[in-house]
Image: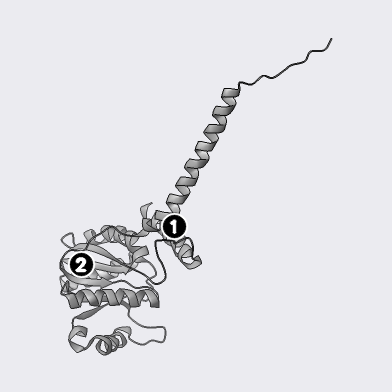
Amino acid sequence: MGYTFINIENPDATRNRSYGRLWLAGIFVVLVLCFLHWGGYLLVAPDSLPDHVDATVVLQGSVASEKARVARAMALLQQGSASRVAVSVPKESYWGEEVAAIARQYFEKKYGTELAGRVEFCETAADVNSTEQEAQDLSACIQEHRWKTVALVTSNYQGRRAGMIWRKTLPKRDPSIHFSVDGVADPEYQPRGWWRQPLYAKIWFTEFTKLVWAIV
């Protein structure tokens, strides 16, 4: 004698599970959209600059980034928001030329002798290849000039990570030095719509990885 089993499922339970899946899918979509919209700003430092600093320190970067950073630092100098500008440069170029001497000529030609005379060049070792190593070298330069308030001028996407690294480095050198981070709009990266451009996305993923590593 055979038996037939009929699986009678509660329609309300099935409906509730369907609603639950839709809610989860909706939440996931909202989170993804929020990430795409605001995720680019995760890299940007939230610092605000004081009315005046002893010096702005321009960190090293690509050619395009360096131009934007130098322009911002010199604008602060012209406005009277900074007394001096310090530019991070390697001691020698690939061809053995002294970088500071070449840079001096550039500043005198572009900004005039008077403003160029208020620019210092902080040399770093030839093997510097990280923000942490650059911070260590530049900290010595800052101490040498006895600057107590400093604004780090770097690209917007590097601002948060640079701030974290410098906050770990400077107190070891001189806890009396106060600094803030000025994240400059970079031609190679825009926080808004960062996922639409391959270059922006590449910079975001690279910098976000470095940020996580710095936190760890």
Residue 2 placed where, x, y %? 82, 12
SS type, badge 1: helix
Residue 66, by quadrant, is bottom left
Residue 125, by quadrant, is bottom left
Q: Is residue 63 above or below residue 173?
A: below
SS type, badge 2: strand
Q: Viewer-proximal residue, 3 or 202?
A: 3
Q: Viewer-proximal residue, 16 or 81?
A: 16
Residue 45 placed where, x, y %? 30, 59
Residue 18 placed where, x, y %? 57, 32
Residue 170, by quadrant, is bottom left
Visual colour scheme: one colour
Q: Is residue 6 above or below residue 203?
A: above
Q: Viewer-proximal residue, 208 or 141?
A: 208
Residue that numbered label 1 is attached to: 209
Q: Quick check: 36 left or right of 156?
A: right
| Residue 123 shows up from this direction | no
CA–CA distance between discs 2 and 1?
A: 27 Å
Residue 146 placed where, x, y %? 15, 70
Check the image and name the residue furthest to the right.
1
Residue that numbered label 2 is attached to: 150
| Residue 114 shows up from this direction | yes
Labels 2 and 1: the sequence-earlier one: 2
**Image quadrant where one finds the N terminus:** top right
